[in-house]
Image (cartoon, rainbow, N blue to C red):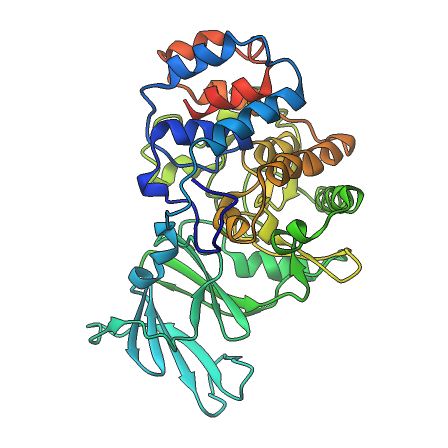
Amino acid sequence: MRFESSTPSAVLNKESTTPDDAAIFATLTSYSLWEGAENNNKKDFINNRTNSSDISSEHTHFTFITKALQSNLDSTMVDRRTLKIYDLVKEVSENSWIINEGALITRHHSKPAQPYWEDGEGRFFTMEESLDPRPFTRRISDSCPITDACRMSTRYWGFFKIGQAYLNVSLNFGAQQHNTLAALAKRSLDFMIPTEYCHGVYGLYYYIVHSILPGKSIAEVLPKTDDDAVKAGWGQQIAEAYDQLSKWHGDRICGVDGGNLGSFYTTKNGPFDDFSIYAPDKFQKNYEEVGLDCSEFVFAHNHMMPLAFMLDESNKLIGINFWGDAGFVPKDLVRTVTRSNSFRESVVMCNEYNWTPKDQWQWKRWIDNPLGEKGFREFWYAMHVWSLADDHPNKALGVASLKDEALLAIHGVW
């Protein structure tokens, strides 16, 4: 695993990283950046660390965790997630491509009759369902105009840059992002949101093409910014935006169109492909078991990560991306989700932008503290204890005994 490397291409290789690496990585970040398998050595790792008298302050935690991470780095690794695009995008011709086996993207040299977006060089793109039977395809060429904008897209969730637009792909089972963007466009907000160009449901997947917001993402800008006060100010602006969104209320857990939301602790043990587990009443039952107040449901972005927030040259937050998970949730869930994972699909890009372990550590606090000041409570500890199977040995630890945040993160890998 690598977040600082001697070469730009030396990044985290997820598939070749050991489970212990995953535990150390989660310890550093205290959120779910890692999708690692069950770690058989976690208990010994935890016991060794809990016997140390050095772990007594946040500074000591950071020093210990950083050293542990650095000892497990391998600068020769290449992150295999960045190669997924060759599986997800197939070339039909020099002017057409199929994404996720469902969407046919075509490049036109004149303005087409159907909805389109531009490439910035006088040509136009359209999207429609791919032909059946699917035409012969080949590996994408070096001139392919489609890139993986987050560098870690999968068949279940993808984010691609195509000309002057982004294409977001997700499983189709609930709230749809074009409805969310349309509803947000009618509200008076202090920040910009993307504009939809077109959308479609092809097979199991929902596809939406939308505009690229101006400015640069926090993921790109943060490593180039030395002033901690400026960076902390971004957290304040994000908290203000989230607070503004929370003034919009709903009557249950759902999207603006009434569709189900698609994540956030729906079940302890799966199966996660059973769409019935995303029903509002099942969400609410789980959250009440954790201890969240479900007496009010507020609108939330629900996709906290550095790639989501766009800044202008004066370091002002001017836009927010990634609205596919947005909807009405218990107010207590807003900060609980950001505490659980504040990087999500930004992990690889932050790596490639050369975020340091200190950057990652501070980012969490820059966004968490202002949210707390805005009255958002968090139940991250309780949520992770709840998510354990009832017969799990760590279930008996309870929330009260897990006050050391660095050690809790180790437990959080489970």
Quadrant of image for the C terminus: top left
280 and 286: which is toward the camera: 286
Judge left or right: residue 132 versus residue 369.
left
Residue 160, percent from left and from top:
46, 64
At a point 31% along the width and 20% down the height, the residue shown is 40
Residue 413, percent from left and from top:
43, 25
Spot the residue most to the front.
6
Quadrant of image for the N terminus: top left
At a point 30% along the width and 74% down the height, the residue shown is 91
Quarter of the figure with residue 403: top right
In this view, 112 is above or below 62: below
At a point 41% along the width and 59% down the height, the residue shown is 206
99 and 47: which is toward the camera: 47
319 and 353: which is toward the camera: 353
At a point 74% along the width and 61% down the height, the residue shown is 312
Judge left or right: residue 69 versus residue 256.
left
Residue 379 in sight in this render: no
Spot the residue most to the bottom.
110
Residue 276, percent from left and from top:
37, 38
In this view, 234 is above or below 19: below
In this view, 13 is above or below 145: above
Residue 370 in sight in this render: yes
In this view, 142 is above or below 9: below
Residue 231, percent from left and from top:
74, 45
Numbered marks: total: 0
